[in-house]
Amino acid sequence: MTTAQQAPDILSPAFAADPYASYRVMREQYPLIWHEGMQSYIVSRYADVEKAFKDPVFTSDNYDWQLEPVHGRTILQMGGREHSVRRALVAPAFRGKELQEKFLPVIERNARELIEAFAADGSADLVAQFATWFPINVIVDMLGLPREDHARFHGWYTSIIGFLGNLTQDPEVTAAGLRTREELAAYMIPVIQERRANPGDDLLSALCTAEIDGTTMSDEDIKAFVSLLLAAGGETTDKAIAGVFRNLLANPDQLAAVRADRELVPAAFAETLRFTPPVHMIMRQPSADVELSGGTVAAGKTVTCLIGSANRDGERYADADRFDVFRQDLTTANAFSAAADHLAFALGRHFCVGALLAKAEIEVGVNQLLDALPDLALAEGETAEEQGLFTRGPASLRVTFTPKG
Ligand code: HEM
């Protein structure tokens, strides 16, 4: 085990500019680091991150202080039966018939509307004009909330992800996040009460009426879950869709292959999740002393699990630093299930409950964008550089294309 003085520092500007080079050094030389500033251990190898997700000794109690202040209490911080029951209450809406029949048309409509707004322009920023809006608009519509509130939710979304990424503890960003918590509660609680009295055919009504073994969701539970959806379902999908295009635009032969054979879209998404995952790191807190590569972590300490590094582990993937939609060591068929062999959705108890919704959104979004934007290319001067520490993705993706006539 080493200290941050010797190893790459994940809070340094060099790391922010290119974490992937540091990840390699960490995996090879410093598999277990104690970071004094973060008061956390850091693990970077695939085997250790996988263990932290799957072994029940690793709790997610860290979310009590990481997420509860902005969302309220959510399933992410629960364990045992409390988690299983709460998860069973919400999961049906994000898979199977509900997803295919009820929500797919919502996804298609929102993608189409956003694209129509710029398809005749010949240029666009796919982050600012598409990716940041698309998943939020979809969630608002799935919940059955007024479509004229898309911009209001986009504002709350921006404030929540600002709060979660506020490593420098900027007081204005903190205040805006806490204000959003109040505003969202003031908006949601009356709507939830109204929906309980008059349930409709939407996700919010489904949450209001769901019951498992006599357990139902309180108004506060539902409000907290909606808040979580904005971050967990919004920011991730936002960064994923931008990532798919960034990776394909950087590999024009692969872009051409995907454009010609749309069956490859899920493979392009799966490989993007491995190569540039939207969530680069999440924490866990072991309830007992636990052995990891490089030493023992004591019970109660925080462990930061570097998904972005684990997914580039040469012990797990051949030529791991290369984006390759045709790679043989990543199974697309499993990539959106708890049997996934990448770690971008985590694994185990908290495996992303929205993975199939994300897949549906990415498939619809990528296909519609490819159809509407022929000759898609990066705009001059666009470097599509990634930004972010815990979550990471291109800050902008300015592209040009032949305008729709
Ligand atoms: C590419 C898109 C996405 C990525 C990369 C992603 C990533 C993740 C990760 C890493 C976790 C586990 C967190 C942990 O264990 O600490 C998670 C959990 C979760 N995700 Fe996603 N997610 C995505 C899309 C979505 C969508 C679209 C939704 C729903 C609208 C969603 C809702 C959730 C929820 C509710 C959880 C908590 C599950 C639980 O605690 O049992 N996610 N996601």
Image (cartoon, grey):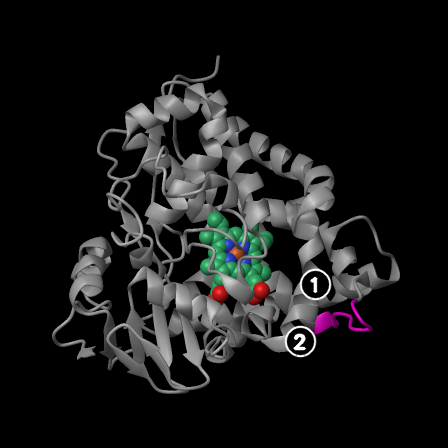
Relative placement, left or right, of 21 versus 92 is: left
Image x and y of residue 277, in percent: 38, 51
Q: Residue furthest right?
A: 197
Q: Name the residue under label 1.
A: 88
Q: Do the residues labelled 1 and 2 touch (CB within 8 Å)?
A: no
Residue 217, magenta (yes or no): yes
Magenta stretch containing residue 90, yes or no? no
- Chief secondary structure of the magenta span? loop
* Label 2: element kind: helix
What's the magenta region?
A: 212-220
**Looking at the image, which is closer to me, 110 or 331?**
331
Q: Which residue lies furthest to the top in this view?
A: 405
Residue nearest the observer in this picture, 37 or 40: 40
> Can residue 292 be seen from the camera position used here?
yes
Give the residue type that dot 1 points to: Ala
Describe the element under mark 1 as helix, strand or loop.
helix
Q: Mark 2 points at which residue?
A: 81
User: At which x and y percent is residue 284?
Assistant: 43, 74
Whether 62 is drawn above or below 337: the answer is below
Give the Cα distance between marks 1 and 2. Answer: 10 Å
- Whether residue 86 is situated above or below residue 297 in the rendered picture: above
Q: In this view, does 94 lie to the left or right of 23?
A: right
User: For the point 81% across and 59% down, which residue is it?
Assistant: 195
